[in-house]
Image: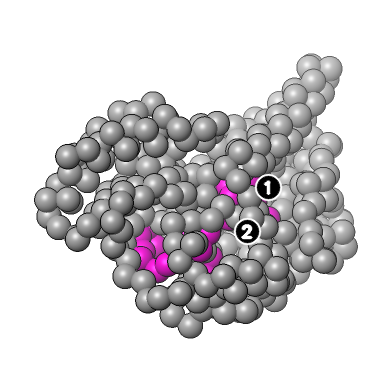
Amino acid sequence: MIEILSTTALATVQDQGRTGALQWGVGTSGAMDPLALAAGNLLLGNDETAAGIEMQVFPFSVCFEDACAFAVTGADCAARLDGDAILPWWSYQAAAGQSLHLDLPTDAAWRGARAYLCVAGGIDVPVVLGSRSTQMRGAFGGHQGRALRKGDKLKTGANFASKCQTGYGLVAPALKMARQIDGHIALRVLPAAEYDLFTAESREVFWSEPYRITPQADRYGYRLAGPNVVPSAPLELRSHGIVPGVIQVPHGGQPIIQMRDAQPSGGYPKIGTVIGADLWRLGQAPIGSRMRFVQCTWDEAVAALEEVEDWLGHFRRSIDHRRNIQT
Amino acid sequence: MTEQPQISLLGTSAPLFEAPGETTLATQQRIWGLAREAESWPEVREAVPGMNNLLLSFVPPPPATLESLQRRLAEKVVR
């Protein structure tokens, strides 16, 4: 059992997301940084689809009631286990009764917005519509369909703690696969249906100027601030299914990027969509940071996904290799 | 409203098919029919009918090219 010690809000149980239920109006949910969660699970010998705890408001503390192998991935939050500093993206063994404390994300090597606590066996909550992710709109999935509260106790899955070797880790993908332009996070975008209906000037500034993430940014979506993008003529649109990463432009011209807890459908004009391979970068972008959009093609977007898969695959093989040596 | 059927992308996860013409029930019924059929296509995980449009999400990874999917969708438009 893991007990939540802090009153901090907005921490949720998440996995890789609930796919296949959009037709019933159920959005994707899932980790804002799916790569960090997958990597944390690999470090512990879990299936990559196992659930972990996503934390986005700090400080945050939990107590391990039983001995438990764990890893903290995502943003570097200067974590401490019973006061001893521990590394992010590294697997550790906690003894029964030890507490884990995460502080505000540091600026050390890169600054992220969300951290993930992964445990051997994964967080054991019921699978609902194929996923353990918390569905905030529908109040189901995750732990009782809601954000975690002080005093909540979470079970871990089949306990491999005795078999799970710890004491290794990896370099954060934000360092290994960094993408920046002029010091801003660079996100690759595929133009969407209404792209050509925006003015030439709008399309120009969209690719050439930075956009800032305003404080109105959460798991539902990010409101951006930057140069206005406006359509050449008023657009009449019919609502359609929405996926994470869609960049909509409501009246007023300031874009919104839909994220994991986005509404399942919508009809604002879409200028583009952040490609799947870059959604983890977006999920880690803090409020106030600036981003640049880079136009990309279908082929480039598919190749980018392969690059991410290769990164995980390489890491999976080296961990398997290490396990084989030790057993 | 579009004059021609439109196939666009919602990132790497899903193409969006939009029917041409006015928003009508007859078109919507064809969208529902197309959704049922498209769900059986191998690269499609889920077909999500919208208002006179259809979003198709992929079984990951996304196909290397979209040609065959676009061709099948285009065939369905022939009246």
Q: Residues within 10 Å of mark 2 (few under 14, many from 20)?
A: many
Q: Which residues are magenta?
A: A255-281
Q: Secondary structure at mark 1?
A: helix
Instruction: Name the residue at the left extreme.
Output: B26
- x, y (%) of residue A79? 79, 58
The residue nearer to you, when weighing A164 against B34, is B34
The residue nearer to you, when weighing B68 against A238, is B68
Q: Secondary structure at mark 2?
A: helix
Q: Residue at x 82, y 60 (%)?
A: A110
Q: Residues within 10 Å of mark 1 (few under 14, many from 20)?
A: many
Q: Quadrant of the C terminus of chain A?
A: top right
Q: Residue at x 17, y 44 (%)?
A: B30
Q: Is residue B20 left or right of residue A275?
A: left
Which residue bears the numbered disc 2? A283
Instruction: Answer whether residue A261 is magenta in the image.
Output: yes
Which residue bears the numbered disc 1? A36
Identity, as a three-letter code, of the amino acid under mark 2:
Gly
Question: What chain is tagged by disc 2?
Answer: A
- x, y (%) of residue A168? 83, 36
The mark closer to the camera, 1 or 2, is 2
Q: Tell me the distance, in whole angstroms, between the alpha carbons under discs 1 and 2.
A: 10 Å
Identity, as a three-letter code, of the amino acid under mark 1:
Ala
